[in-house]
Amino acid sequence: RHAGGGDDDGRGRRRVLVFPLPFQGHVTPMLQLADALRSRGGFAVTVFLAPVPSSSSLLHRPAGYRFVTVGAGVAGAAAALIPSGTGGDFAGALMRLDALLRAPFEDCLRQELAADEDAAAGPVGGSNLRGMQEVAERLGVATLALRTRGACCLVAYMAFPELCGKGILPPPTSARRDQHQMDMQLDELPPLRLRDMMFSATTTHATMATCLERLLDSSRCSSGVILNTFNDLENSDLQKIANGLNVPVYAVGPLHKISIGEHNSLLTQDLSCLEWLDKQEAESVIYVSFGSLASMDPEEILETAWGLVDSQMPFLWVIRPNMVQGSLQVGLPDGFEEATRGSGMVVSWAPQQDVLKHQAVGGFWTHNGWNSTLESICDGVPMICRPQFADQMINARYVEEVWKIGFELEGKLERGMIERALRKLMCSEGGNEMRQRAKDLKKKATTCVEKGGSSKTAIDMLVNRIMSF
Ligand code: UDP
């Protein structure tokens, strides 16, 4: 749709419509992208949000955006669909949410287009909601698919049907599945192993296959795929995507370094940890956080607590209130606080990007959500990887085997192994080499968003693409 008269070049009146999944790891990059488009292309932005619990508590609604709640009438049903923690059937829930939101989204989109008839430029959709894309297509609105995960993840998803065709997926049910088989390297996807493709413990293979097919369809049917990554980090996977999906690919990340907008945290950040970090020595602190969805059982919390204390290293640990399985309480062990002797801090939600760029932070123990992984890379912080589900195993594998800026902590969590892992990352020669490689990647991440850099150029190309709709 073309903008009507008004501004000199019509740019100021174009409107981009975005629809992120209502979770921190999706809302954050989508709003960062919206911000980049707004500042580079002068677009106005409408943000559609589904009313599942996290979006209803979206704390900070940046000025200058129009927020539209989609499916207020189905809020209860939508909220009930989304499982919390790792155990849930996310893929199934997403598809049900997608179906539930279709009709309400169509109403909202019609209203939006009627209100802004000459200003719509086409939505940038999260590629997890294929149904929303189908609605947009029907109403004549061009779409772009933002993948909020890495290129490595999309390449793995693209290989899923081939692995099924060869009988490699699904592996035999757990009774017959042995460790050796799960550790098998996949020739089609080096350096991934079969177990890195086990995206969920509870989703059936058929549901996963359908979900991934719809997700790939949303990329194939779009006018372009946007990825929060950069060329120097994932060049060969970006090439595979461009060749395999046959649509333009825009690697515009790291978006948090491109976006100049205000923060868009869904939870209240505890800023006092930044003051605490100011008092710590350079690169001495290990930052421990498992993102917005991953969980731990009470025993894992206990072992982590004592592993951190036994390492005698300063630490900053994020424990969300709902992070402990089966409990609303954090459940730190008795005597823990005294044992840390002031050298550790626990918060319920941190300003993570500021933490990772703080000079006191020397390592990150992470679940390897894509945003956390990318944020760590961009600030040159090496990682201990503890992936749980979805794309996290893939990201962890790349951290260890491709970029060599960290290593995976495997097996049942136990305080002795935690202490050893922390020492390896923070005090060993191997850990220093990982830190050095992470710092080299940081330089590349910095260059790509500068004038003439690959991501900055990709944003400009994307702006031109949207203007051409
Ligand atoms: N995050 C944060 N404070 C915290 C923990 C996480 O701001 O205490 C942010 C983090 O910076 C990242 C996002 O939450 O941008 C988590 O996204 P990710 O993809 O890493 O994991 P997910 O939450 O989707 O599992």
Image (cartoon, grey):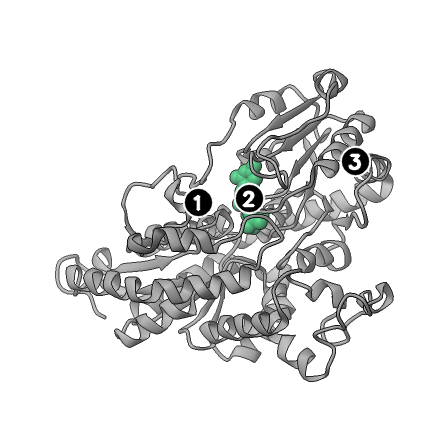
Query: Mark 3 = which residue?
Result: 426
**In the displayed structure, would residue 384 be above or below residue 210?**
above
Q: Label 3 vs label 1: CA separation?
A: 35 Å
**In the displayed structure, would residue 1 be above or below residue 334?**
below
* Rendering quadrant holding ligand 1: top right
Q: Label 1 vs label 2: CA separation?
A: 10 Å
* Label 2 residue near ligand 1, CB within 8 Å: yes
Displayed quadrant of residue 301: top right
Q: Is residue 53 visible?
A: yes
The answer to the question of whether label 1 and label 2 lie on touching residues, with beta carbons closer than 8 A, is: yes
**In the displayed structure, would residue 397 be above or below residue 221?**
above
Query: Mark 1 = which residue?
Result: 54
Q: Secondary structure at mark 2?
A: loop
Q: Position of residue 220 (x, y in %)?
A: 47, 77
Give amino acid for label 2: Ser
* Label 1 residue near ligand 1, CB within 8 Å: no
Position of residue 422 in the picture relative to residue 40 (left or right): right
Query: Mark 2 = which residue?
Result: 292
User: Which one is in front, 458 or 107?
Assistant: 107
Q: Label 2 vs label 3: CA separation?
A: 25 Å
The answer to the question of whether label 2 and label 3 lie on touching residues, with beta carbons closer than 8 A, is: no
Q: Secondary structure at mark 3?
A: helix
Give amino acid for label 3: Met
Q: Residues within 10 Å of mark 2 (few under 14, many from 20)?
A: many
Marks 1 and 2, the one that precedes in the sequence: 1
Q: Position of residue 40 (x, y in %)?
A: 35, 54
